Image: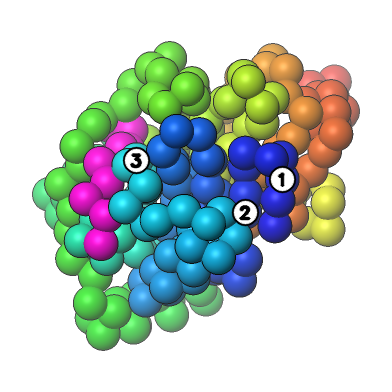
Amino acid sequence: MEITPRVHRIDKMRGNCYLIARDGLVLIDTGLPRTAGRISACIARTLHRSVTDLHTIILTHYHMDHVGNVPALVRATGAQVVIHEGDAPYLSGEKSMPLPSWPRSLLIRMVKPFLGWSPVRPDILLRDGDTIAGLTCIHTPGHTPGSICLFDPEEKVLFSGDTLLTERGRIQGPSERSSARQEEATRSLARIASLDFEILLPGHGEPVGPEASARLREFLAPAQGR
Ligand SMILES: [Zn+2]
Ligand SMILES: [Zn+2]
């Protein structure tokens, strides 16, 4: 799905994945394991590029529905892997992934041994305010310690990971059941509401836009008035 001429969402992924096409290709999140073929197909058939043009993979957080295809893609492309320093130990296997006890995570926990996923050592660790591939890293802890949103000032797009989800074109806020620390997550939302973006691209759900940042402020307004 074309979001803007340079930004595409890869179809049929569990956990949204986005490609940004400039000189090279940047991938934001990678979906569940064993679906890397869909990402390669989008690069080849939709963007008419080579998978080796993929030079950077940025992860919004360490959950398996976002990091699942990292090992396969690194093998295929040699791309550098980028994640916030707070989530890096979970990707590299230094810390084991704590999984919340809701159905999808339970399923992931059960099938994980059969997925062929192996830990990956990230190449670049992000901190709040860092710039990577033209995107600004905004540290938005809550869903995980190292959750980030990525702001593209050129395209006026915000990639929100699981910090902010949508359903049927409406902003839903962070997932209550999956967010480890709800208060922290709410503070993070207030931070991203101060940005100016047209399109919101969530970790799950459909894009929201235009005037997505105004819609986010509207969404947060009742909560702030309490
Ligand atoms: Zn997710
Ligand atoms: Zn998540």
Measure the C-alpha gap from mark 2 to mark 1.
Answer: 7 Å
Residue that mark 2 sits on: 9
**Amino acid type assigned to the residue bearing label 3 in the image:** Thr
Q: Nearer the viewer, residue 213 or 41?
A: 41
Asked if the magenta segment contains residue 194, the reply would be no
Instruction: Answer left or right for 82 relative to 176.
Output: left
Residue that mark 3 sits on: 56
Q: Nearer the viewer, residue 194 or 56?
A: 56
The residue under the point 70% across, 51% down is 2
Q: Is residue 7 above or below residue 148?
A: below
**Amino acid type assigned to the residue bearing label 2 in the image:** Arg
Q: Quadrant of the C terminus?
A: top right
Q: Quadrant of the N terminus?
A: bottom right
**Along the polypeptide, which appears first: circle 2 or circle 1?**
1
Residue that mark 1 sits on: 3
**Amino acid type assigned to the residue bearing label 1 in the image:** Ile
